[in-house]
Amino acid sequence: MVSWKDYNTSYTENKIQELFNLFDWFSPGSLGTREHFRDFYDEPLKHGQRLSAPERFIQIAEKRKRHLATVLQKYLLRRTKEETIGHLMLGKQDNVVFCAMSDLQKRVYRRMLELPEIQCLVNMDLPCGCGSPLIQVECCNRIVPNGIIWSPCLIKLQQISNHLELIKPNPKDEVEKQKKDVELVSAIFGTDVDLVGGSAQIESFLGLSGAEHCGKMRALEKLMFHWTSHGDKILLFSYSVSGTLEQHSNKWV
């Protein structure tokens, strides 16, 4: 038997071929051949889940989903935490820790705020300087300089707050995006660029998660030292992974 969370919906949330790979690994042939599985389950489910799918496709997908759930039921065993380790759980306690940015992060953050694109956002509700009765976002600043939209700028501010390595060009991105990121990094790092090892993203995991110039990592180091010194076990989750960090994400646990 294999434990699989919510078998009735899991294969619609994950790549269904991964479900086939799992079952074909521990019970070869239990779901038929790969071609049969793809034609009978995978394709109908994908077509039926599209927003523009015809009603006929939706009905077929629902039938195939129920059929697959019936087939999988004999292989699945679901146990909740309360059933298995409930007696070991002492209850959940949430503690929110506010992490101050490092001095370097603050300098980079301020330089980011001074960029024309960000100033358009900061001053969007102020009266327009041209003398019209409209606010800036409805008048002269409806289009930000160079056509750069605001949302990526806000993401960059979030990345600066998390770790400065996140805003460096990702070698996996398209060339044009890397060029734009190089320009941004040059503008906001300024004379501090040498302190972060240059504008190129560090490849090592330790470098990507270094605490020297990261307020969040400094706080995390202290917390982990406190927890481990008391014999506590730690399971660490990240809100998201980005670029090179993705290949190292498993090392956070």
Image (cartoon, rainbow, N blue to C red):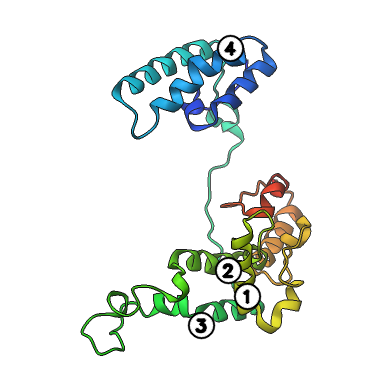
CA separation, marks 4 and 3? 59 Å
Residue at image coords 56%, 63%: 97
Precedes in sequence: disc 1 or disc 4: 4
Instruction: Say the numbered circle drawn on residue 161.
Output: 2
Q: Residues within 10 Å of mark 3 (few under 14, many from 20)?
A: few
Q: Is residue 10 left or right of residue 106?
A: left
Instruction: Say the numbered circle drawn on residue 3.
Output: none
- 179 to 247, vertically: above or below: below
Q: Residues within 10 Å of mark 2 (few under 14, many from 20)?
A: many
> Along the line of sight, which residue is nearer the eye, 170 or 239?
170
**Quadrant including the C terminus:** top right
Look at label 2 and name its amino acid.
Ser
In front: label 1 or label 3:
3
CA separation, marks 1 and 2? 7 Å
The residue identified by callout 1 is 105
> Quick check: can you spot residue 252?
no
Instruction: Say the numbered circle drawn on residue 31.
Output: 4
> Along the line of sight, which residue is nearer the eye, 240 or 183?
183
Residue at image coords 63%, 55%: 173
Identity of the residue furthest to the left in this view: 133
In front: label 4 or label 2:
4
> Along the line of sight, which residue is nearer the eye, 251 or 55?
55
Labels 2 and 3 touching (C-beta < 8 A): no
Q: Position of residue 83 (x, y in %)?
A: 55, 26
Q: Secondary structure at mark 2?
A: helix
Labels 1 and 2 touching (C-beta < 8 A): yes
The residue identified by callout 3 is 114
Look at label 4 and name its amino acid.
Leu
CA separation, marks 1 and 4? 53 Å
Residue at image coords 51%, 16%: 39
Precedes in sequence: disc 1 or disc 2: 1
